[in-house]
Amino acid sequence: MLAMLLVLAPPEDEVATRFERMVRSRGVGVARAAIGTVSMQVELTRSGTASVELRALGARVHGVLNRGLSIDSESQFEDSERLAAWWSALAYFPGPVVNRPSRLGFLPELDVLSLVERVPNLDLAPMHIGSKTPPSLTGSITNIHSARDGRFLGRGNLHGEEELCLFTGFDPERTCRILWAGDKSFATDIKPSASIGAAGVIKALGKELRSLSATFSLVVLQVSSSSIELVHATPVPNLSNFMELEEDVYEALLNHLLQ
Amino acid sequence: MILCIGLAADDTFRHTVAAIARQGPGVVDVIDMAQLAFSGTVSFPLNELHAATIELRGKRYSLDRYAAAFVRLHDISHAAPTQSLGVRSAAIYRILCRVFTYARISVLNPPLRDRSNFSKLFHAAELASIAGWRTPRSCLTSDPKVARAFISSCTGGVIFKGASGAKTWATRYERSLHESRLDDLLPSCPVLFQECIDGPDVRAHAIGDSLFAESIASTKLDYRMTRGNQYCTIESIPSEIRTGSLSLQRQSQLPFLGIDFKIDRATGEWFFLEANPMPGYEGYDRRAGGAISEAIAVWLRSKSAPASAVPFNSAL
């Protein structure tokens, strides 16, 4: 075995499971962080120097893919304690961590409001939080996400139990997806005519994402000749976001984690 | 104008609102989160946050009317009487956290500026480094052998407590009581061990460039467990604590912090424990004759005056 990698993810995370399978097929040791499989040691000196050692299945961990952890209401206290422990451990882990925790969150904070504030020439796509589609978005294609937890609820009209939603208006003909994985980025659906104008903003966005340790993240942009608008950003891309690039994306993550 | 959003059932919120209202008539609007969840409506165009509006009991609150806000937000969804109200309440909590972190008005405190409190060791290490303070030696582990080695290395004794922001009591480690439980408990849930600093606790409240500190002498290891504590105002706060507090406020963009320290009785050295951006401070304020809440009100009032209506991050 070359090295031991660790994957932190909720049990139902398909991307994490498929990444583990690919890593194993390359002869690299990999374990899913779970009770009993990982030994954790985080020490802090009086002068504030932190040191971390993680061992999985008896071997020293070399790198970690962080896809977040879920907190179950039935075991909320224990889950919170584990999450807090992982937060400290991954923040100071000396090896590579994809999506390293920070003061802003256990996963990189990719709030669109923050990104447009920090990346020059990046605007926000028409977005509205409320209980109904606002007049300004009537007639345009609208994605609807839960205002409570950010889940995608559908397109068009609001229905179901969520009363407060995020409505995002966009033009599918002008959107493109940029996925950052390790040290690489992958652009899909971007039209050559638009890519030249967007290149500077995408470069600045990539720099910002790296500064936030968002080394596995997806951004959806809406590009026109006069503007580049942010439609969506997440530090937890799902498989449908990169199905056609799956092998390449896992390869990029693996290379990053083996550095 | 100053907008206050919080829970009417929260003593600290009511205490602070009363102090702000004493600044003069017509300076403050107050929104109760529970009422908002129950019967209000929100409309937040994210592209134009200044045009965000809340409607509640026939009154319309437009964000562009306010230059400063006092927000003390709680997720009360778990206490909602119905599932749909719980869903709505959680959504409102999350929306308000986002809006008051990124809105271009002065906010005390922007809710999402620092979430490190969730993880105590990380929080202590990060903030101590910004402020230039020392912190007790700590060990967070799921490995009983590592825990035993750390405990042996702490000649002055060890305490243990939860690793997260969930409320737990700091407890002195006693070999006869706890040794046998390490092997069973640690592998399933890491525990935070810390060298015991023998001496009084300190709670300091930093607001703007003012700092108020009290020492707390208690018969209990964790002073929150008893009511018979002796509180004493610290008149001469060390200069490194003052400068460190200001650094922390500026770097974190949090104008108000409740900061906890321990003072080593033998050496007089201060050790940083944690900084809370939403402290329950009214007991300290009453003993200080209302000086803390007045400083909060003055800070908000200064930010709401037209000449200084700038976002927080441009000025403390």
Image: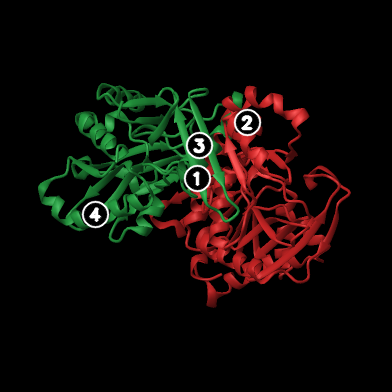
- The amino acid type, in three-letter code, at marker 4 is Lys
Distance Cα–Cα, label 3 vs label 1: 13 Å
Q: Say the numbered circle drawn on residue A51.
A: 1
Q: Earlier in the sequence, mark 3 or mark 4?
A: 3
Instruction: Please check whether the numbered discs 1 and 2 fall on a single chain.
Output: yes
The chain holding disc 3 is A
- Please, is residue B55 above or below residue A25 in the view? below
Q: Position of residue A10 (x, y in %)?
A: 44, 27
Residue matched to label 3:
A86
Mark 1, secondary structure of its residue: strand
Residue drawn at x 43%, y 37% as measured from the top left = A150
Answer whether labels 2 and 4 touch (C-beta < 8 Å).
no
Res. A48 image quadrant: bottom right
Q: Earlier in the sequence, mark 4 or mark 1?
A: 1
- The amino acid type, in three-letter code, at marker 3 is Trp
The chain holding disc 1 is A
Report the coloring of the rendering: by chain
- The amino acid type, in three-letter code, at marker 2 is Phe
Mark 4, secondary structure of its residue: helix
Colour assignment, chain B: red
Instruction: Please check whether the numbered discs 3 and 1 fall on a single chain.
Output: yes
Of circles 3 and 4, the one toward us is 3
Q: Is residue B166 visible?
A: no
